[in-house]
Amino acid sequence: MTIAQQLKTADRPLISVEFFPPKTDAGRSTFDQAAVELAGLNPDFVSVTCGAGGTAAGPTLEVCRQLAGLGYESIMPHCTCVGMSRADLEASSDAIAEQGFNHIMALRGDPPKGESSFQPAPDGFQYAAELVAFLRERHPGLCIGVAGYPEKHPEAASLEEDIARLKEKADAGADFITTQLFLDNRVYFKFVDQCRSAGITVPILPGLLPVISLKQINRMQDFCDFHVPSRLLHDLEAAQDNPAKAERIGLYWAIEQISELVENGVPGIHLYLLNRAQTAFYPELFACLSRVRGN
């Protein structure tokens, strides 16, 4: 079944994980280990990024093939507009479909490193909604996911404007939305209410990052701005000299988030694990995820 079909028929929230293609030999070793170990988590689907700033589709498809060989079933490669003409996107999406992958996460993508604003490639797309419409027309059977920003996209003038752009993606044919990370569940619940009020009806999956340090939060905020609850911030600041304690704080925070989200009927939990299998297998977090899956 496609992810969209799973979302309609599952009697529990889906569990999904994001991978990213490694860029170094050390990263390759970490990824290889994570790919093998996270198969034991048995996620309902996995996504594979194109990398920050947009990189070629080749590494993404290579990772997708590797994951398929390890037994992962629903695999969703990311596809961005960065540096891609329509002809490039035709070739990329055709290659994805021809290799048996029937899901795509359709994104505009971040500006390349060193550039402050997004510029479409010649004969390319300016907005993700255009990419969604293109993919829906060229590959009608694809299951298409898109991104949502609970605390608005950094380039948007307001959250209301950003939700209007998100509705354009849904109206163009997106099957579901996965949110960018947030650390305060109230942000997600308010975002969903605003999306529903705007006429967005597709499932909205919360995206969570089990944080491991204050430094990691500061690094992630360079890519997307998000609110850090004062209690979490205080605890992480107090544990800056104790990495193991900081990691426990972040993991227990993620468990609290997951538990509350599931109690409130979310359609799934999407984990940004940053190719760190050990995060998912922290005993209390693994037990939490197992309960969600009904294991």
Image (tube, rainbow, N blue to C red):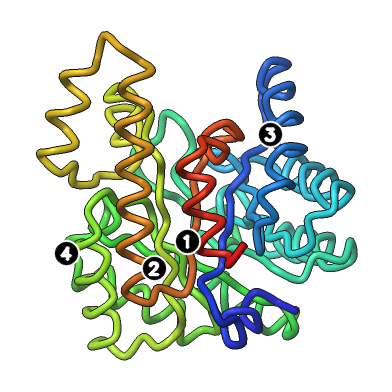
**Residue at 18% of width from left, 61% of height from top?**
157
Q: Amino acid at mark 4?
A: Ser
Q: Dot 1, crowdedness within 10 Å: few (<14), some or many (≥20)?
A: many
Residue contact between numbered discs 4 and 1, judged by CB atoms under 8 Å: no
Q: Amino acid at mark 2?
A: Val
Q: Which mark is residue 34?
A: 3
**Cα gap from disc 3 to disc 2, whole angstroms:** 25 Å
Residue with the mark numbered 4: 158
**Cα gap from disc 3 to disc 4, whole angstroms:** 37 Å
Element assignment for label 1: strand
Between marks 4 and 1 in the image, the one whose residue lies nearer the viewer: 1
Residue contact between numbered discs 2 and 1, judged by CB atoms under 8 Å: yes
Q: Give the x, y percent position of residue 197.
A: 23, 88
**Cα gap from disc 3 to disc 1, whole angstroms:** 19 Å
**Cα gap from disc 4 to disc 1, whole angstroms:** 26 Å
Counting residues from the start of the chain, the first of labels 2 and 4 encountered is 4
Q: Which mark is residue 262?
A: 2
**Residue at 67% of width from left, 29% of height from top?**
22
* 203 sits left or right of 24 in the view: left
